[in-house]
Structures are given as structure tokens and as C-alpha cells.
Image (cartoon, helix red, strand yellow):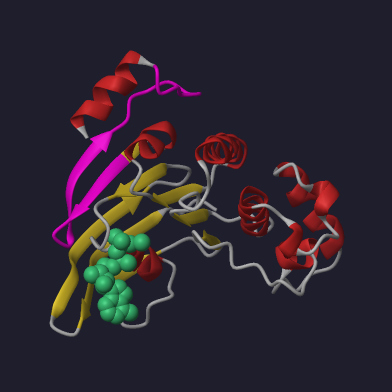
């Protein structure tokens, strides 16, 4: 699991509209990168291209074999129990035990037999994270994963992602329009604008991070 992400000349047009123009992007193994930009700037389009979900995207994409995506909507199947949702599509033995371990990591082992409809929004997103973790991904692609959560639940979910990243060290690409979230979590923040990576910021902040740190406040002003 030593490869990172290498994207060259990523491009995407919808009709006459060019959304991505020759985007180059590298993520080292274990690096946490955030992609920010205005709504409609093409963040999700780029993430989907990297995830291999967009057959019409152009460019060259080198991505670790095992990658997992978490979207803003958790996309859990309502008629399958939580543990089955976590291991869906896996073709291995001991699925129940593997699901239990992944759910334990997000603090939800007790809900393994529940149906998704009985979970809160924050719990559903934690199940989506467990579903990603159980695949031991070399790359985690997160598209506004906490965008639909209330402020307090979002803070807890951010802290959870920070802990999981520290423990498992996948490469991460986090798409967010929340600048503070980007600074709380990422090593590097990329600004997507005009179909290009318009700016790159290195985040030289100690972990664990707090929004009250003076350096955090200074970086926040720059962005
Ligand atoms: P972001 O995630 O940064 O908010 P998106 O990547 O979702 O932006 O979208 C970028 C632009 O591409 C938007 O203008 C959007 O309307 C357009 N777009 C995205 N998907 C499609 C599609 N399937 N068909 C047409 N236009 C699309
Ligand atoms: Mg988006």
C-alpha cells in the first residue's frame, strides 16, 4: 500500500462547459489533502474522476488499488442491517466479525443489528465511515462527508476522522467548502477555481488541532 495518487491533466466537460482543465494533483501515501472551492467549482467532479466513477473524465489517474468513498448522503441500504451495509460487496469470510471491528472503531458496535432508518444523521455517517474502513483503503475519498450534520455532530465527526486517519494513515482527499474543516484536518489545502488548482496552502499546524490556535487563526485569514 505504498502508492499515492497521481493525477495528470484531468479534464471534464459537460456539453460546451469545461469544468476541469488539465488538473494535476499528487497525494503522497498517508497524506491528508483537502480540496476547497466555491459551490459548482468542480470539486465533486474531480473526486468522482479520481474514484473511477466518471467514464467521461479525461486524463491519467494513478490511484491505490483499494480506495473507498464517503459521500454527503450516506447511501446506506434501508432494508439491510447496519453490519450488512458495512460489508456489502465484500466477498470474504467472517464478515460479521469484520463489520463489528469496523463499527467498534466508530463507536457503533452496539448498533450492528439495527436498520439504518433508526440511526441519526451522525450515526449514519459513522456507519458510512466504517463501511469505508472495513476495506482497509489506501485512499479515502470524502465528498463533503459532514455537510448535512449539525454543528456539534460535525465537530465530533471531524475529530473521529482525525483519529481514524492517525491510526490507519490512508491517503485522504477531503472535498469540503468549509475552510475551518480543511485546516483542522489536512496537511495541504488546494483551492479549485476556474477548473484549475488555483492555490495550494501547506498547513503547518501541530496535531491535534484547535481552531483557537493563533496559527490557525492566521491561516484562516489567508484562506
Ligand atoms: P462542486 O462539487 O464543486 O460543488 P460539481 O463538481 O458538483 O461542483 O459541479 C461542477 C459543475 O459541473 C457545476 O456547474 C455542475 O452544474 C456541473 N455538473 C456536474 N455534474 C453534471 C452533470 N452530470 N451534467 C451536467 N453538468 C454537471
Ligand atoms: Mg460537490
Residue range highlighted in magenta: 189-212
Residue 137, by quadrant, is bottom right
Which of 145/78 is in front?
78
Residue 191 in percent (x, y) is at 23, 47
Residue 128 in percent (x, y) is at 63, 57
What residue lies at 82% left-to-right and 56% top-to-bottom?
112
What residue lies at 43% left-to-right and 42% top-to-bottom?
31
Which of 203/112 is in front?
112
Q: Is residue 43 visible?
A: no
Residue 211 part of the magenta-drawn span: yes
Which of 87/38 is in front?
38
The answer to whether 211 appears left or right of 11 in the picture is right
- Outermost residue on the top side: it is 214
Q: Quadrant of the C terminus?
A: top left
Q: Is residue 98 visible?
A: yes
Q: Quadrant of ligand 2?
A: bottom left
Which of 73/83 is in front?
73
The image shows residue 78, relative to residue 218, as above or below, that is below
The image shows residue 30, relative to residue 147, as above or below, that is above
Amino acid at each position: 500500500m505504498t502508492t499515492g495518487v497521481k493525477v495528470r491533466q484531468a479534464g471534464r466537460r459537460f456539453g460546451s462547459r469545461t469544468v476541469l482543465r488539465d488538473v494535476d494533483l499528487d497525494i503522497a501515501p498517508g497524506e491528508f489533502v483537502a480540496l476547497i472551492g466555491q459551490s459548482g467549482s468542480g470539486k465533486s467532479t474531480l473526486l468522482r474522476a479520481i474514484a473511477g466513477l466518471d467514464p467521461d473524465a479525461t486524463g491519467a489517474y494513478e490511484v491505490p488499488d483499494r480506495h473507498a468513498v464517503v459521500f454527503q448522503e450516506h447511501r446506506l441500504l434501508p432494508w439491510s442491517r447496519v453490519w450488512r451495509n458495512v460489508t456489502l460487496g465484500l466477498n470474504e469470510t467472517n464478515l460479521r466479525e469484520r463489520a463489528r471491528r469496523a463499527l467498534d472503531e466508530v463507536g457503533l458496535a452496539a448498533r450492528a443489528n439495527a436498520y439504518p432508518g433508526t440511526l441519526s444523521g451522525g450515526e449514519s455517517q459513522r456507519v458510512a465511515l466504517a463501511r469505508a474502513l472495513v476495506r482497509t483503503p489506501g485512499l479515502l475519498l470524502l465528498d463533503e462527508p459532514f455537510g448535512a450534520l449539525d454543528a456539534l455532530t460535525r465537530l465530533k465527526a471531524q475529530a473521529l476522522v482525525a483519529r481514524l486517519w492517525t491510526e490507519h494513515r490512508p491517503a485522504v482527499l477531503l472535498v469540503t467548502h468549509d475552510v475551518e474543516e480543511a485546516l483542522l484536518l489536512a496537511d495541504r489545502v488546494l483551492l479549485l477555481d476556474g477548473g484549475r488548482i488555483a492555490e495550494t496552502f501547506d498547513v503547518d499546524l501541530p496535531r491535534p488541532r484547535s481552531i483557537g490556535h493563533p496559527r490557525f487563526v492566521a491561516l484562516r485569514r489567508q484562506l
